[in-house]
Image: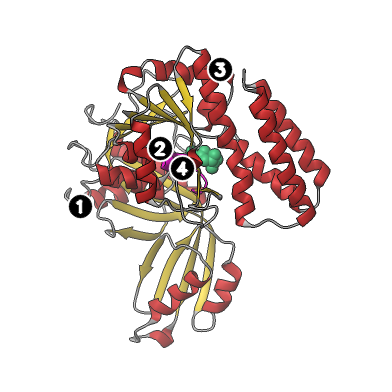
Amino acid sequence: MIVMKFGGTSVESREAMQRAAAIVRARIERRPLVVVSAMGKTTNKLLAIAAAAVRGERESALSQLEDLRAFHLRESIGVENEIEAHFTELGELVRGLAVMGEMTPRAVDAVSSFGERISSLIAAEMFRRCGLNAAHIDSRDFIVTDARHTQAAPLFDETNRRLAAIAKMTGVVVMGGFIGSTRDGVTTTLGRGGSDYTAAIAGAGVGAEEIQIWTDVDGMLTADPAILPGGYRVKTCSFAEAAELAYFGAKVLHPATVLPAIEKNIPVRILNSRRPESEGTLIVAEAPACSSAIRSIACKRNITLVNIVSTRMLMAHGFLHRIFEVFDRFETPVDMLATSEVSVSVTIDNTRSLDPIRAELEKFAQVSVEQDQALVCMVGDHIRTSPGVAARVFGAIRQINVRMISQGASLLNISFVVAARDLAHAVESLHKEFFTDPDPTAFE
Ligand code: ASP
Ligand code: MG
């Protein structure tokens, strides 16, 4: 079996669904199990509707809901009754939220689950009309999770037991991504972007030979196209590189996707549903050697640098502990870290709790904050074994003021922080340095 996951843009309309059907049909002998995201931006819209309801904007919520209903009816065929039934249920939920005026994580999941519940019904019917023998299943009967609503974690033993039944089914099974349910049958979701995760969980559960992530780009590129157009497609990369790239801002793949796949050693392929003939990017446990030390340049904008200085802490132990305890208490992840005897610099991208964090840190240190920074991350399995990579990196950007550097934690990245205004220049210079004459076995 193979798992074929189609993201929001790959099922955003009837035409997109028909394209997906043709892609599935062309691979029918590999026994596809299909996982779909919500159509287009449906999840965002559902969350906006719920938020409006809770704010007391009942009429606005209901009219947005009506737009979403009309959209799904317009972009589907043959499942009007099911769609109506779902929107009736959803309407009741939204009215309830408007009355309650508050939204629990459990209610968020109840609302946001509708995107995938409906898109999977529509996709299954569209596939049937395109001549496929498609069967719809409700993912909530298969993906069993804990009760951490909006970020639920699968209970793998139970989930795998249930998924095993799918391997015995005939025809093309279609299921929604992102959603699951607790043992008690309460609807949960795996976190935003979670359909990739569903694909990996399902792939591991049915023992798939490959997991295909169908999206709207040709796979991973050597540089973020929004910053540097004209990068090359990365033909193959390792699981570790993919995770690192995703962590540092490459938007094509949810990092958690790789976990169940790594464990079972299942290759993951990122493919473009608008250009199915492109080979995409293959992610495997170990990528074949190539002559480039760098596989790709990822970057993350809107980074905030926090510098923490305390001469009082000179020679004292426990300084890092105190600092991290503060970030931890305010549930703010730290991306990158550099230390000296009396100072620590960290980067964060979630600044929601920056003010209280700062106030807490100022109880024992001087704190300065620099906004509008960007993180550039060069990723490659062979950075550690290729002498001179750092020299080439910093040679390429010698005109740029680098605020912070980190190499080593994972052995496969060199990352640094620059002012956001220098980002494009930095990426361009680095790309020229490392990809002017790319190894054709690894890049195209
Ligand atoms: N529909 C969900 C979201 O937008 C899950 C996904 O598309 O992966 O986050
Ligand atoms: Mg996604």
State whether residue 239 is above or below residue 3.
below
Residue 253 placement: quadrant: top left
- Closer to the chain start, of discs 2 and 4, is 2
Residue 393 appears anywhere in the view: yes
Report the number of discs.
Answer: 4
Q: Amino acid at mark 4?
A: Ala
* Label 1, label 3: how far apart the Cα atoms are: 46 Å
* Label 1, label 2: how far apart the Cα atoms are: 32 Å
- Closer to the chain start, of discs 3 and 4, is 3
Residue 103 placement: quadrant: bottom right
Depth check, mark 1 against mark 3: the one in front is: 3
Q: Which residue is mark 2?
A: 199
Residue 40 appears anywhere in the view: no
Q: Which residue is mark 1?
A: 384
Q: Nearer the viewer, residue 375 or 141?
A: 141
Local SS, label 3: helix
Density class for disc 4 (Cα within 10 Å; few <14, some 14-19, many ≥20) is: some
Furthest residue in direction right, as rendered: 59
Identity of the residue drawn at 31% across and 42% down: 261
Q: Are marks 3 and 4 in contact (CB under 8 Å)?
A: no
Density class for disc 3 (Cα within 10 Å; few <14, some 14-19, many ≥20) is: some
Q: Nearer the viewer, residue 241 or 308?
A: 241
Depth check, mark 4 against mark 1: the one in front is: 1
Q: Position of residue 125 (x, y in %)?
A: 54, 20
Q: Nearer the viewer, residue 373 or 115?
A: 115
State whether residue 128 is above or below residue 351.
above
Q: Amino acid at mark 2?
A: Ala
Depth check, mark 1 against mark 2: the one in front is: 2
Identity of the residue drawn at 40% across and 78% down: 321
Q: Position of residue 145 (x, y in %)?
A: 46, 51
- Closer to the chain start, of discs 1 and 3, is 3
- The span shown in magenta is 190-199
